[in-house]
Every structure is written in C-alpha cells, then in structure tokens.
Amino acid sequence: MIARLNGVLIEKISPHVVLDVHGVGYEVDVPLSTFYQLPALGETVTLWTHLSVREDAHQLFGFHDRDSLQVFRLLIKISGVGPKLALALLSGMEIDTFRGCIAREDVLMLTKIPGVGKKTAERLVIELRDKIGKLELVQKVTLNAPATPLFVEPASPQEEAESALVALGYKPLEAQKAVKAVLGQHSETAELVRAALKGLLK
C-alpha cells in the first residue's frame, strides 16, 4: 500500500496531478479541495494516498490531509459510491459541511453535488450518520514545502477553475458561466473555484 507521496509537482490538470518522486512520475487523482491547495508547478508537495487495485487498473487517489483520506475511505465502502463519486463529494463541499449535512440528514443539499441522486443521498445519510460522527479527525498537514521551480507555464486561473469544475461533473457551459460570474471578485484559482461552487450550489 502506498500511504503517502512526497515529490515535485510536475503536472496538474484537474482531477489529475503528477508527482515526480526520485525520478518516478506518479499520476494521482485528487478532489478539488486538494487541487486548489496545490503549490505551483515545480514545487514540492505531500499527499496522503489511497491505492485502488482492480483487474484492469491500479489507481492512486491523493489528499492534502488525512481527514479527507479517512472520509474518502468511508465513502467508497458504501454501495453505489465509487471513487469518482467520492471525489465529487469531497470536491463539492468541505468536510465539516459534509458532516453537517449527514448529521442534519440534509438530503437536498447532498443532491446538489453532480452525480448524487436522491436515493444515493439517502443511502449516504443512513450509512454514515453513525460512523462519520465518531471519526477522529487529525491535524492537517500543509501541502507546501520550498523547492526550486522546474518548468511549465500553468494555464490562467480562469481556465484552471473552469477545468476543475468540468472535472467535478459540471457541464462546460455551466462551469464557464459560474467562473465568469465571480471573475471580477477573485483572481486566484482557489478563490475562483470556491466562489463558483458556492454559486452553483445555491
């Protein structure tokens, strides 16, 4: 099991990132909550990981803290919730907000996440309401560590934000409109993603 990776960030195209770890490139799928906390290309990053092994593929999923990893592992144990939907849930809302939805049995809020229908939302509430409240959250580990930039000019914040929303499951036109609506208020990718998501979830 690969529990953690520490390496140089050489590519980030949501939901995928590539880390160079001593000359070996690891492709990792991450939720938006992790994606918008990533450092610049060429800098060092640490991700807590989960390795999914199937007959046709080995897939790594990465998270900026162990809390997100624990919640991801709870989610993928639920029938009908695969890794892709689990990433969408962790992308669509912060962990505290998600826990609040489960505690309040707020099915309607959960269904605003792309890919989550009413039945899936109800299943999440039923299966997680006793488990997620007992989950011990640990201290978060910062992603950033100093390093010498390598190469690659990143896309503009607007393009990165739109790509991140499309990867989450929104249609390109929806993503473009949501980002454009908040473009005058924010300039960084992370800020644009957060603001656009708030607008889409209203």
Image (cartoon, grey):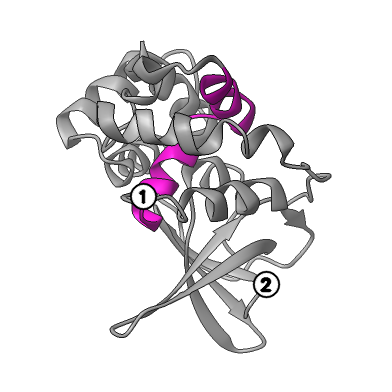
State the extent of the magenta-drawn residues as a range.
81-103
Question: Where 56 sits versus 121, above or below?
Answer: below
In the picture, the quarter occupied by the N terminus is bottom right
User: Few, some or many C-alpha atoms within 10 Å of disc 2 (few <14, some 14-19, many ≥20)?
Assistant: few
Q: Which mark is residue 3?
A: 2
Residue 73 in picture, x, y percent from top left: 55, 55
Residue type indicated by callout 2: Ala
Of 57 and 82, which appears nearest the observer?
82
- Residue 147, by quadrant, is bottom right
Question: Where 15 sits versus 149, above or below?
Answer: above
Looking at the image, do the residues carrying marks 1 and 2 touch, with CB atoms under 8 Å apart?
no
Q: Which mark is residue 52?
A: none
In the picture, the quarter occupied by the C terminus is top left
Q: Secondary structure at mark 2?
A: loop
Main SS of the magenta part reads helix
Of 73 and 21, which appears nearest the observer?
73
- Of badges 1 and 2, the one in the foreground is 1
Residue type indicated by callout 1: Val
What residue is pinned by disc 1?
81
